[in-house]
């Protein structure tokens, strides 16, 4: 199948050496400019850093975060209670397991910030929370990076499976430990006593059991179908592992070890003949081919010339466009649109040829004119009530085969006679409006081949070589393409921008091929998943994601489960040979398989396990229950499952809604008959400040530790992944020099979490600006300064914080105290509302506005004028309540301040409640008046004045001329 576009003008091209030199010169010049820019800003930046350090001295996030991370881990602070007590209000969230391919990136930090805020909020509201950590073995991703590592260190070991497995486990332990460390550094309140890994033996038992259950239900089957094939990785790929990129017309790419041109449309001539002459035509073609038995390239062209002289000269032809001329070898049909009016032209041509045959017949007994013969033929056709060119099934069976009764085509490379079919897949508005069908090498053609009952001919093998018996046999696919280009059947070649599928791991071009694999029928499961969301059994946030959910599940395809890898869950299937046929047995172990074979065959058979592993998404799809003891193979393993399944919520990125989330829902209904979680919450993708997707090759991937600890530009460049190419390395350096001339300042985990949450707005992508994180690190310092002030007031008045925290009413209150308590009540209500609706942008905005503008800018300043016990009680109570509100978003600083005030390691365990006292006050109007005076051009206030007395109508002034209730510092 191909698409079409207008031809582009051919641009003059540089030689390879000229291109390389020009590229190197451009990179060098750009790096030099960026280096100069860096030198110019270095002195200024150093001054800024010194000023900032002096200004913000006091709160050290590194010391505080290290202290509390250690305390939480040593005391298993976040370990959940596990028992059958139904009175426990349980809440469960299982973390989407990060791949062990490397360190966490800023997108994972976003996930942790959101999830940990949710679980801490629920924990503070009395829930028994299980926040379960885990890691994903990430089949093809991990195998790819480990293979690259082995290739660098000892390429002789690349085919050694045992050596690979040992290296992969070593890699898994190294990066798994690093990921867990990053979880801790981010302040995640995970229960590490229940940490899981997708290759854990207990999970492996769950995976085997799931496969067997689905197989016994008839949902898993083995069949020869179309797959995405990576010749370089030597495995099938999931759709997620295929990247589609636009290639410009005539662009050169290195594929299969050589440079080749892509983005070209080849126009091919196919000759059309009448089906009634098929036998005679086939015999004639075979006679010609006997003269050129040797399958050499020279004979190939001579054969074409002979065909042209003896057959083609009497036949009409059509022109078909293709971007893959090498697959002509596998063409088994030509496709035309049933509404294509050019069919009439072909009809007229054959009718004319038939008339001419009759006119030239020397044995005619009656002489007629040409017009009389033509009329007679038409009349005869009507009498026989048949239309030679009618599309079979077009009127009464549009989904069935529409094969022409009367037309055939000749494959221009193999000279095989192939049918002409009619299908609306041939778009009249694109290109020539006709298609060549290669069922064994194109996803859409595969469906057309099934629909119209066509032959499936494999012409490209799994090593990307031509395997069809022809002059091109043994050649790499694109080498063959270049030779086919010279064949006389190619009328012309035009440049054409096209979209090509690339392997996300190896970057080689994906080849659609036919391969016998294990498949999972998803139709019934998809319907259940669709109903679950539509009927509200599972809540899906945000609302707009429901349309995507429905679209994917309505158009569900069967799931290819097989992967030709070493790293993963080995498929629990065993095969044996019987009468030259391969028979399969699905079982948990080879002993169980032998038992089943004896029962089936009545004798022992030599068994061998399938060498393939399961798609990573299959084991990940069991994650909500395989982590909780489902089918672990142990006697007492169901307590966690009873208590925490279904999970309360799944939170994850919107980019894997179908590839992971939908599959978890489908497998849960298929295996357990119920939903895996109550709620699905999706967040957007974190991009850089310019809106570009983060990629190692672009150098814009940010390690959360960089932001927490700070990092220099040189360190960022040194840490560029070794798994990128030389060109990608240069591009990454360029990006770092441009975007981070001074590296990344130390911000701390709290500032990073708060900043990421402040960006969160449904599924909208996030353009992360590091300066914004730095801004929230200054907010941390502001909060710490507020703490120091509150602490000093407590010390000055010899007051215990416990007495203030337990206050329920405050007696007679002045207006400014009523006002701040009102503001606190509003903030508490907003927090509850925002958490329930997953509005984390609202959570951070509410907290930010309250502490900065209501508490620090107004109430603290007012409190300096009052030193009564009631004023202190309100000050401390409000600040402690704010610290508790802050805790889910900034756990480190909130825990530190809370414990400093209490002078103990007391854990924040409750969420503040609204103050129920009557708090009616007109103080807000006083503040508005003060703002108006400050902003007025008419009011003149001395900058040395400590107070500005505002007199309101009907306000009583005491004997000294004071009204302390309405006196406040401006």
Image (spheres, rainbow, N blue to C red):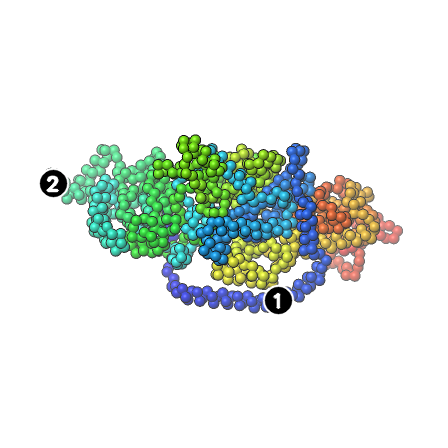
Q: Is residue 701 in view?
A: yes
In the displayed image of the protein, which residue is found farthest to the front?
Answer: 604
Callout 2: few (<14), some (14-19), or many (20+) C-alpha neighbours within 10 Å? few
**What residue does disc 1 label?**
42
Distance of mark 1 from mark 2, alpha carbons?
Answer: 102 Å
Q: Are marks 1 and 2 in contact (CB under 8 Å)?
A: no
Q: Is residue 152 above or below residue 583?
A: below
**x, y (%) of residue 948?**
79, 56
Q: Nearer the viewer, mark 1 or mark 2?
A: 1
Report whether residue 96 is seen. no
Which residue is depicted at the point 61% across and 45% down?
115
What is the quadrant of the C terminus in the image?
Answer: bottom right
Q: Position of residue 301 (x, y in %)?
A: 25, 54
In this rendering, would 218 be left or right of 328? right
Residue at 71% in and 42% down: 910
Residue 308 on image: x %, y %: 23, 51
Task: Determine whether the residue tagged by mark 1 lies in a helix, strand or loop.
Answer: helix
Residue 250, picture quadrant: bottom left
**Farthest residue in the right direction?**
959
Give the residue at x 67% y 53%. Answer: 66
Residue 749 located left or right of residue 20: right
Q: Which mark is residue 959?
A: none
- Tell which of 833 and 958 is nearer to you: 833
- Name which residue lies at 20% across and 47% down: 287
Q: Is residue 882 left or right of residue 292?
A: right
Quick one: SS at disc 2?
loop
Tag shown at residue 363:
2
Front one among 550 and 932: 550
Residue 118 is situated, as x and y percent measured from the top left of the image, at 64, 44
Task: Give whichever of discs 1 and 2 has the lower sequence position.
Answer: 1
Q: Nearer the viewer, residue 526 or 629?
A: 629
Q: State left or right for residue 467 relative to residue 186.
A: left
């Amino acid at each position: 199948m191909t698409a079409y576009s207008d031809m582009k003008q051919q641009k003059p091209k540089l030689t390879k050496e000229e291109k390389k030199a020009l590229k190197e010169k451009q990179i060098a010049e750009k790096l030099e400019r960026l280096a100069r820019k860096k030198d110019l800003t270095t002195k200024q930046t150093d001054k800024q850093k010194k000023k900032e350090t002096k200004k913000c001295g006091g709160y050290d996030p590194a010391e505080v975060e290290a202290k509390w991370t250690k305390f939480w881990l040593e005391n298993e602070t976040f370990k959940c209670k596990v028992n059958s007590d139904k009175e426990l209000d349980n809440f469960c969230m299982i973390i989407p397991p990060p791949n062990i391919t490397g360190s966490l990136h800023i997108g994972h930090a976003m996930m942790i910030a959101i999830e940990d805020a949710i679980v801490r909020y629920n924990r503070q509201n009395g829930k028994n929370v299980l926040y379960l950590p885990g890691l994903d073995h990430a089949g093809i991703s991990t195998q790819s990076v480990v293979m690259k590592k082995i290739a660098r260190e000892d390429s002789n070991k690349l085919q050694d499976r045992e050596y690979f497995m040992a290296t992969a486990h070593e890699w898994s332990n190294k990066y798994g430990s690093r990921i867990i460390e990053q979880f801790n550094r981010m302040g995640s309140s995970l229960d590490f006593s229940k940490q899981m890994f997708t290759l854990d033996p207990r999970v492996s038992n769950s995976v085997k059991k799931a496969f067997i259950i689905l197989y016994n239900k008839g949902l898993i089957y083995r069949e020869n179908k179309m797959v995405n094939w990576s010749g370089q990785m030597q495995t099938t790929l999931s759709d997620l592992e295929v990247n589609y990129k636009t290639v410009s017309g005539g662009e050169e790419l290195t594929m299969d070890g050589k440079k080749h041109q892509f983005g070209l449309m080849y126009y091919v001539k196919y000759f059309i003949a009448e089906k009634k002459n098929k036998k005679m035509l086939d015999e004639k073609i075979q006679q010609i081919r006997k003269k050129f038995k040797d399958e050499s390239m020279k004979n190939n062209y001579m054969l074409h010339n002979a065909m042209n002289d003896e057959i083609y000269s009497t036949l009409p032809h059509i022109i078909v466009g293709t971007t893959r001329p090498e697959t002509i070898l596998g063409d088994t049909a030509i496709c035309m649109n049933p509404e294509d009016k050019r069919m009439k032209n072909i009809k007229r041509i054959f009718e004319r040829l038939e008339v001419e045959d009759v006119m030239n017949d020397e044995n005619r007994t009656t002489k007629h004119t040409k017009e009389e013969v033509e009329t007679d033929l038409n009349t005869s056709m009507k009498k026989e009530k048949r239309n030679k060119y009618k599309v079979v099934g077009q009127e009464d069976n549009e989904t069935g085969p529409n094969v022409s009764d009367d037309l055939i085509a000749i494959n221009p490379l193999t000279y095989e006679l192939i049918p002409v079919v009619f299908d609306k897949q041939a778009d009249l508005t694109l290109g020539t409006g006709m298609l060549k069908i290669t069922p064994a090498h194109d996803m859409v053609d595969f469906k057309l081949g099934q629909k119209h009952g066509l032959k499936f001919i494999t012409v490209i093998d799994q090593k990307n070589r031509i395997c069809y018996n022809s002059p091109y046999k043994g050649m790499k696919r694109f080498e063959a393409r270049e030779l086919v280009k010279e064949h006389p059947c190619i009328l012309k070649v035009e440049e054409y921008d096209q979209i090509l599928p690339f392997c996300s791991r190896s970057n080689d071009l994906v080849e659609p091929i036919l391969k016998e694999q294990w498949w999972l029928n998803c139709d019934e499961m998809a319907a259940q998943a669709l109903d679950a969301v539509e009927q509200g059994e599972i809540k899906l946030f945000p609302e707009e994601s429901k349309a995507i959910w429905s679209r994917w599940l309505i158009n569900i395809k069967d799931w290819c489960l097989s992967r030709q890898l070493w790293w993963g869950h080995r498929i629990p299937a065993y095969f044996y040979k019987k009468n030259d046929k391969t028979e399969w047995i699905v079982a948990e172990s080879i002993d169980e398989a032998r038992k089943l074979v004896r029962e089936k065959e009545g004798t022992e058979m030599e068994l061998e396990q399938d060498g393939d592993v399961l798609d990573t998404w299959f084991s990940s799809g069991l994650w909500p229950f395989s982590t909780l003891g489902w089918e672990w193979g142990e006697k007492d393993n169901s307590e966690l499952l009873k208590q925490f399944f279904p999970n309360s919520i799944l939170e994850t990125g919107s980019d894997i809604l179908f590839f992971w989330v939908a599959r978890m829902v489908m497998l849960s209904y298929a295996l357990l008959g119920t939903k895996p979680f109550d709620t699905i919450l999706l967040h957007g993708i974190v991009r850089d400040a310019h809106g570009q997707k983060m990629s190692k090759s672009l150098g814009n991937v940010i390690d959360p530790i960089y932001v927490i600890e700070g990092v220099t530009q040189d360190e960022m460049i040194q840490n560029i992944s070794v798994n990128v190419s030389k060109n990608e390395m240069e591009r990454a350096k360029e990006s770092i020099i441009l975007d981070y001339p001074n590296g990344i300042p130390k911000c701390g985990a709290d500032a990073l979490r708060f900043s990421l949450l402040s960006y969160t707005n449904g599924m909208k992508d996030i353009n992360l600006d590091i300066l914004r994180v730095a801004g929230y690190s200054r907010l941390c310092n502001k909060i710490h300064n507020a703490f120091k002030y509150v602490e000093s007031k407590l010390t000055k008045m010899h007051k215990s914080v416990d007495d203030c925290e337990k206050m329920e009413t405050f007696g007679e209150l002045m207006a400014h105290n009523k006002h701040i308590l009102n503001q606190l009540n509003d903030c508490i209500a907003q927090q509850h509302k925002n958490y329930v609706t997953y509005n984390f942008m609202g959570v951070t905005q509410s907290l930010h506005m309250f502490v900065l503008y209501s508490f620090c800018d107004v109430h603290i300043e007012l409190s300096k004028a009052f030193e009564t016990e009631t004023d202190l009680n309100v000050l401390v109570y409000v600040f402690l309540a704010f610290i508790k509100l802050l805790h889910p978003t900034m756990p480190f600083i909130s825990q530190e301040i809370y414990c400093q005030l209490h002078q103990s390691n007391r854990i924040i365990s409750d969420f503040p409640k609204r103050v129920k006292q009557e708090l009616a006050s007109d103080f807000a109007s006083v503040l508005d008046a003060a703002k108006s005076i400050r902003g007025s051009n008419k009011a003149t206030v001395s900058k040395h004045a400590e107070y500005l007395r505002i007199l309101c109508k009907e306000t009583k002034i005491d004997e000294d001329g004071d009204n302390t209730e309405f006196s406040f510092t401006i």
